[in-house]
Amino acid sequence: MPQPFIDNRLWPLLSQRIRIPAYTADAWQAWLRPAIEYPDTPKAWGTNSTWNAVRAVVQWHAVQDRTLRLWGWPTVQAAWTAQGGPTWDPWALALVAGAIDSTTAVAEFDTPHVLHHPLEPGLALWAWAALPHVTHWPDLTGLAPLLALDAVLRSLVSPSPRPAHPHFWSAWAAWVQDPPPQPTDTVAVWYPASLFTTWAQALATAETLITGIPATMPAARQLSWW
């Protein structure tokens, strides 16, 4: 498997969100290097520190997935899929969801943040927040995620008068006042969900080989220390 690209923003995120083990950003980068180079080959990971770091990340990733389900993300994705819309990368929403309550999520649009820039991985947060306001879906057939989201946002009608404090609708107004995105515009994705899933599968396979008993959840026995 080719070595995946890892954005340097990941290391501070892990150090902030995973307290056990309480590694620094540099420590996360160092200990995970063997697992990034050989993501599906645990025997090549070497030290216990690398194994422990991978276990911690896999557990944290599983928590993000459960949080997305609690926020109703599968329903949101299903609604877009039913309209021929894109399959979203939901992990920016998961990171927001891990820090705040769903009832105040639209307040995340109050602050300029990398997760909410249209060319950063915040499109799922927009898709989640916009869905309750969609009354008429435009044709999304064949549109890239950024273009599909733009089409839906431009189809929305804001309340009148708009609420006084900045929130989703003020961010929406800024979006629709800008020129539409171009087909060549791309969205940066820096949460390596596929890598974390590969690690979970590798851990589960390794546990089966060690014990002869299939794991009932990703790395179930290996995560017992957590």
Image (cartoon, rainbow, N blue to C red):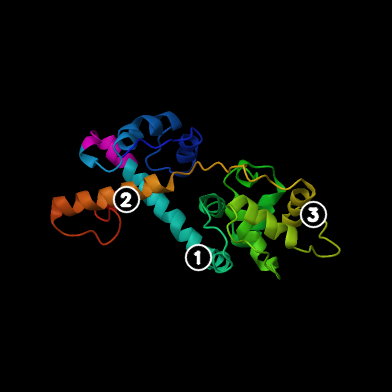
Magenta span dominant secondary structure:
helix
What range is drawn magenta here? 44-53
Would you say the residues marked 3 and 1 are in contact, meaning their CB atoms lie under 8 Å apart? no
Element marked by disc 1: helix
Query: Distance between the Cα atoms at labels 3 and 1?
Result: 30 Å
Of the residues shown, which amino acid type is indicated by label 2? Answer: Ala
Q: Position of residue 20 (x, y in %)?
A: 38, 43
Give the mark toward the camera: 3 or 2: 2
Q: What residue is disc 2 on?
A: 200
Judged left or right of residue 188, residue 66 is: left
Q: Nearer the viewer, residue 82 or 41?
A: 82
- List the single residue furthest toward the front: 142
Judged left or right of residue 39, residue 93 is: right
Q: Position of residue 171 (x, y in %)?
A: 74, 51
Q: What residue is disc 1 on?
A: 74
Q: Nearer the viewer, residue 121 or 114?
A: 121
Of the residues shown, which amino acid type is indicated by label 3? Answer: His
Of the residues shown, which amino acid type is indicated by label 1? Answer: Pro
Residue 25 inside the magenta-drawn segment: no
Query: Which residue appears at 22% of the width and 35% of the height?
Result: 44
Query: Distance between the Cα atoms at labels 3 and 2?
Result: 42 Å
Element marked by disc 2: helix
Sequence order check, earlier mark of 3 and 2: 3
Mark 1: few, some, or many residues within 10 Å (few <14, many ≥20)? Answer: few
Q: What residue is disc 3 on?
A: 165
Would you say the residues marked 2 and 1 are in contact, meaning their CB atoms lie under 8 Å apart? no
- List the single residue furthest toward the right: 161
Question: Looking at the image, is 27 positioned above or below residue 81?
Answer: above
Sequence order check, earlier mark of 3 and 1: 1
Element marked by disc 3: loop
